Image (cartoon, grey):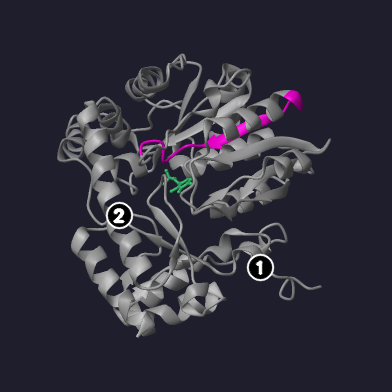
Amino acid sequence: MTSSERPFLNRRLAEFGTTIFAEMSALAVQTGSINLGQGFPDTDGPEEVREAAVRALRDGRGNQYPPGPGVPELRAAVAAHQERRYGLLFDPDTEVLVTAGATEAIAASLLALLEPGDEVVALEPYYDSYAACIAMAGGTRVPVTLRPHEGSFRLDLDELRAAVTDRTRLLLINTPHNPTGTVLTREELTAVAELAVERDLLVVTDEVYEHLVFDEAEHIPLATFTGMRERTVTIGSAGKTFSFTGWKVGWITAPPALVSAVRSAKQFLTYVSSGPFQYAVAEALALPEAYFTAFREDMLAKRNLLSAGLADAGFEVFRTAGTYFITTDIRPLGESDGFAFCRALPRRAGVVAIPNAVFYDHREEGAPFVRFAFCKQTPVLEEAAARLKTLGA
Ligand SMILES: *Cc1c(COP(=O)(O)O)cnc(C)c1O
C-alpha cells in the first residue's frame, strides 16, 4: 500500500472515527431543535466559584504551569472532600493527582496500567471514551451488559464473574452510570469488590456523578469496600458537580504507587492544565453542604419533569437514580431502531437525543434505547416535553 492508499487513522482508532455527538449537535443547529443529546448544563455553576477563578487569574495564581500533581490547595480540598463525605483518608501529596478533567484521568489510568493484550472488563453501555482509551492502550475490552430489570438497568453479577479471565487486568466501573442512570447498590458493589480481591484485579472507577444521586439511592465509593483502597483508582471531576464542564478539572485518588503510575502517563499527555481553575475548584469543593443539596434538588426536579414528559409522550422511561440522563425505550412508540429514530427526531419533533447503541459493542442490545439529558433550564425541558408529546399524534 502506498502512503496515499493507507488510511490516515490507525487501526487502533479506526472504529472511533467520528462521534455521534458531533452529528447530532449539527442536526440540532440545522433544525433549530432543543439539544438534549450532549450532557452539559445550559447554565453556569455558582457565581462565587466563577469569581474565585477570576481572582486567581488576576492574582497571578495558576497563569504559569502549575505543579505536575496539581496545586496543593486543590489536592488538599480533594482529600478533605473524600474524608468528609466518605471517611476515606488520602495523603494530598502522594495520593491525589489533578487531571485535565475526568477524560484525562481515564486515558492516563488506562495508558499507565495496561499492557497490550490485557483485558478490561467494563460495564456496557459505557461512556464513549472508555473504548477508545482501552484501544489506545492496546487493551481488549470485555463488556458486561447492564439489562433492564424492574424499571432500571442492572448488573448481572454472574455475567460479571464469568467475564473475568486469566488475562483480565482491570475492572472499569462507572457509578452513577452514564447513560442508564443506574447507581450500583451496596450489594452489587460488594460483589464487585469481592471479585476484584479474589482475582487480584485493579479497579478504575469513574464516579464523576457522585453528587447527583436521587431518592433512596446512595453513592458508595468502591474504594470504601474491604480490600479495595489499595487496588482502586477513583476518578472525580468538577465539571458535572459544579456545572463548569469547560474548565476541565478532574482528579484521581489512589494509593501512592498507583498515583505515581498514572502520573507517569499524565505528564506526557497534558503535563498540567487549567491553572487558575484549580484554585477555584478548591474553593468549590469546600462549599457548604447546602450547595450540594440545592444542586441535587434542582436536578431532581428536572429529572421528574422530563421523565414525566417522556412517559406522557409514550416512551418507556427507566428510573434515573443518578447522573443527569434518562434512558428510554422507544418500542412503545412502535419504533425499534434508536439510530433511525434519533436521526429523524429533530425534524419530527424538534428535539435531539442520543441512540444508546453508540455506547455498546453489542449494538443490538442497545438498539431500542435512547438517552435524553435533563441538565437544562426548566422552560427548555417544558418546551421539549411539549414537542415530544406530538410524537404520538
Ligand atoms: C462527562 C463524563 C466524563 C468526563 O468528565 P470531564 O471532567 O468533563 O472530562 C467522564 N465520565 C463520565 C461517565 C462522564 O459522563
Q: Where, by quadrant of the figure, is residue 24 drawn?
A: bottom left
Q: Which residue is mark 1?
A: 364
Q: Nearer the viewer, residue 135 or 392?
A: 392
Dot 2 crowding, Cα within 10 Å, few <14, some 14–19, many 20+: some
Q: Nearer the viewer, residue 294 or 28?
A: 294
Q: Where, by quadrant of the figure, is residue 228 drawn?
A: top right
Three-letter code for the amino acid on which mark 1 is drawn = Glu
Dot 1 crowding, Cα within 10 Å, few <14, some 14–19, many 20+: few
- Helix, strand or loop at label 1? It is helix
Image: 333 above or below 302: below
Image: 230 above or below 276: above
Q: Which residues are magenta?
A: 198-211
Residue 204 part of the magenta-drawn span:
yes
Q: Residue at x 35, y 18 (%)?
A: 84
Give the numbered dot on residue 304: 2
Q: Residue at x 31, y 76 (%)?
A: 389
Left or right: 109 in relation to 213:
right
Residue 361, position in %: x, y? 67, 60
